[in-house]
Image (spheres, helix red, strand yellow):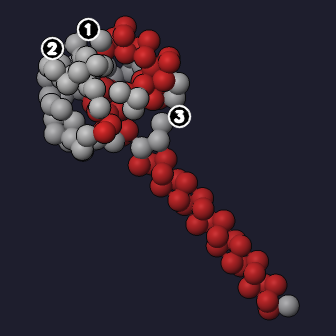
Amino acid sequence: MTTLKSLLLALALLGALATSLAAAVTQKGKANGNAATGRQLFAETCGPCHSATSKTTNVGPGLQGLFKGRKMPATNRPVSVAVVKAQIQKGGGGMPAFGSKYTAQQLDDLIAYLRTL
């Protein structure tokens, strides 16, 4: 009977570990968005200041390869989903704050698109 208890305990611990790892991956940078919808949002609201196809500065820095880099172009903060979302919502480094202009889903869509650049 102790072998069965040990096996059940091991399975329970393995399940808890898998859940923790999944949560850690989500916190580090996965966004559940639609890149096609995000592309449209980018074109409408971000495109006038930012290029999606180059790193050249227009009004704001070009965002090509944003998530492939280590630091944000204007603020030099580390690139992550949380930092990019905060940049969009709170602004900084010359960028105005967009606050609650986007819903949580729209932000996820925008991030999903930015990750494709």
Q: Position of residue 14 (x, y in %)?
A: 64, 70
Q: Which of pointers 1 and 3 lies earlier in the amino acid sequence?
A: 3
CA–CA distance in space, label 1 to label 3:
25 Å
Disc 2 is placed on an element classified as loop
Quadrant assignment, res 49: top left
The residue indicated by pointer 1 is 48
In the picture, the quarter occupied by the C terminus is top left
Q: Which amino acid does the dot numbered 1 rest on?
A: Pro
In the picture, the quarter occupied by the N terminus is bottom right
Q: Residue furthest bottom?
A: 2
Disc 3 is placed on an element classified as loop
Q: Position of residue 103 (x, y in %)?
A: 47, 22
Q: Which mark is residue 59?
A: 2
The residue indicated by pointer 3 is 32
- Residue drawn at x 52%, y 53% is 23
Disc 1 is placed on an element classified as loop
Mark yes or no: residue 63 visible: yes
Q: Which mark is residue 23?
A: none
Q: Which amino acid does the dot numbered 2 rest on?
A: Val
Badge 1 vs badge 2, beta-carbon distance below 8 Å: yes
Query: Could you classify mark 1 by the number of other residues whose Cα lies within 10 Å: few (under 14), some (14-19), or many (20 or more)?
Result: few
